[in-house]
């Protein structure tokens, strides 16, 4: 026993040290979600790896990005349905790689984007699954491949999902009951969202201001509240005054300064 005890003690210490190293840090808590990354002030392309890195560097609570699926079933990050004139859903990844962003980046795959994002544990990754223009069945496939990708990369801790499409949202929640999913379209009340298992709502600023009572109702039901896309300082202050959890903006630097000055 005496021969093996030092080895056992060393292994125990290493195990404890490893567990300590793997324990998650706290994500930022400052309401600021960079819309398509932090691109505007820095001059980066929207939805680029560079804009994600800038959002992380700034210390945003989250960085939002948009995901489509190519003709060869690869998930890629881009806001519009076309990339540099090429329709994403009917183009292969190889075809999309013939074009490049203004900073020289190729269109990021969702896998590449997530791998970059999970190198840190301060900024959440707000994954918008874009509804397909090619039919409902493709929406289910997008949801399935999205959940499979996030799980395969062990990125669930970082990712919150959002979508305008109810089918996509429902499928994600079905495949991953622990997923945090918020609805974007704006027509559902907090009560309806809670009944359907949503994490929260993520509505346009005009809808949130028109239905300001929904903020309180959502919080009473345990839902989160996000508003998009908020680039006016008065709107930012109004949302903060009303207790909005997250604010999605093209001006994260402005919102960070407002939040910091209020603390």
Image: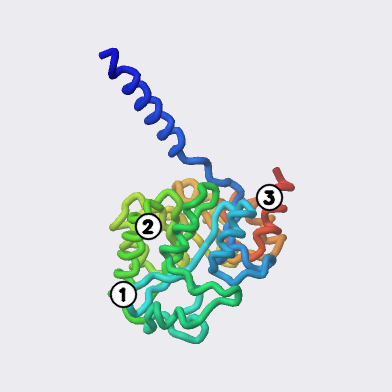
Say few, some or many: other residues with alpha carbon within 10 Å of mark 3 (under 14 / 14 to 19 / 20 or more). some
Numbered mark located on residue 259 in the image:
3
- Which is closer to the viewer, label 3 or label 2? 2
Whether residues under marks 1 and 3 lie with C-beta atoms below 8 angstroms apart, the answer is: no
Answer with mark 2 or mark 1, whichever residue precedes in sequence.
Answer: 1
- Residue nearer the viewer, 220 or 234: 234
Disc 2 crowd, CA 10 A, few/some/many (<14, 14-19, 20+): some
Residue 171 in sight in this render: yes
**Residue 60: where, in percent of width, then height?**
60, 53
The answer to which quarter of the image holds residue 206 is: bottom right
* Residue that extends furthest to the left in the rendered view of this protein: 1
Say which element carries label 2. Answer: helix
Q: Which residue is mark 2?
A: 150
Of callouts 3 and 2, which one flags the residue occurring earlier in the amino acid sequence? 2
Numbered disc in front, either 2 or 1 = 2
User: Whole-Å distance between the Cαs marked 2 and 1?
Assistant: 18 Å
What is the distance, in whole Å, between disc 3 and disc 2 at their CAs? Answer: 31 Å
State whether residue 38 is above or below residue 25.
below
Q: Is residue 107 left or right of residue 12?
A: right
Q: Residue furthest bottom?
A: 85
Q: At 45% across and 62% down in the image, what residue appears?
A: 127
Q: Which residue is mark 1?
A: 138
Asked if residue 195 shows in the view, the reply is no
Q: Residue at x 25, y 14 (%)?
A: 1
The spot of residue 169 in percent (x, y) is 37, 63
Query: Which of marks 3 and 1 precedes in the sequence?
Result: 1
């Amino acid at each position: 026993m005496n021969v093996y005890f030092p080895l056992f003690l060393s292994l125990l210490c290493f195990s404890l040290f490893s567990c300590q190293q793997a324990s998650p840090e706290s994500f930022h808590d400052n309401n600021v979600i960079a819309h398509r990354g932090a691109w505007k002030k820095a001059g980066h392309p929207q939805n680029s790896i560079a804009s994600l890195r800038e959002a992380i560097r700034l210390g945003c609570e989250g960085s939002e990005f948009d995901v489509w699926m190519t003709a060869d079933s690869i998930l890629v990050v881009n806001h519009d349905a076309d990339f540099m004139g090429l329709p994403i859903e009917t183009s292969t990844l190889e075809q999309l790689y013939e074009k490049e962003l203004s900073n020289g980046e190729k269109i990021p795959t969702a896998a590449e984007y997530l791998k970059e994002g999970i190198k840190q544990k301060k900024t959440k990754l707000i994954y918008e699954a874009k509804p397909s223009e090619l039919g409902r069945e493709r929406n289910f496939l997008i949801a399935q491949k999205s959940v499979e990708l996030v799980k395969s990369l062990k990125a669930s801790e970082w990712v919150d999902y959002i979508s305008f499409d109810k089918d996509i949202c429902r499928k994600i929640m079905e495949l991953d009951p622990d997923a945090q999913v918020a609805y974007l379209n704006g027509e559902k009340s907090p009560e309806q969202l809670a009944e359907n298992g949503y994490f929260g709502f993520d509505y346009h600023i005009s809808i949130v201001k028109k239905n300001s009572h929904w903020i309180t109702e959502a919080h009473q039901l345990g839902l989160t509240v996000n508003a998009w896309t908020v680039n006016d300082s008065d709107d930012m202050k109004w949302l903060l005054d009303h207790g909005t959890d997250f604010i999605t903006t093209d001006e994260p630097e402005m919102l960070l300064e407002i939040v910091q000055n209020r603390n």
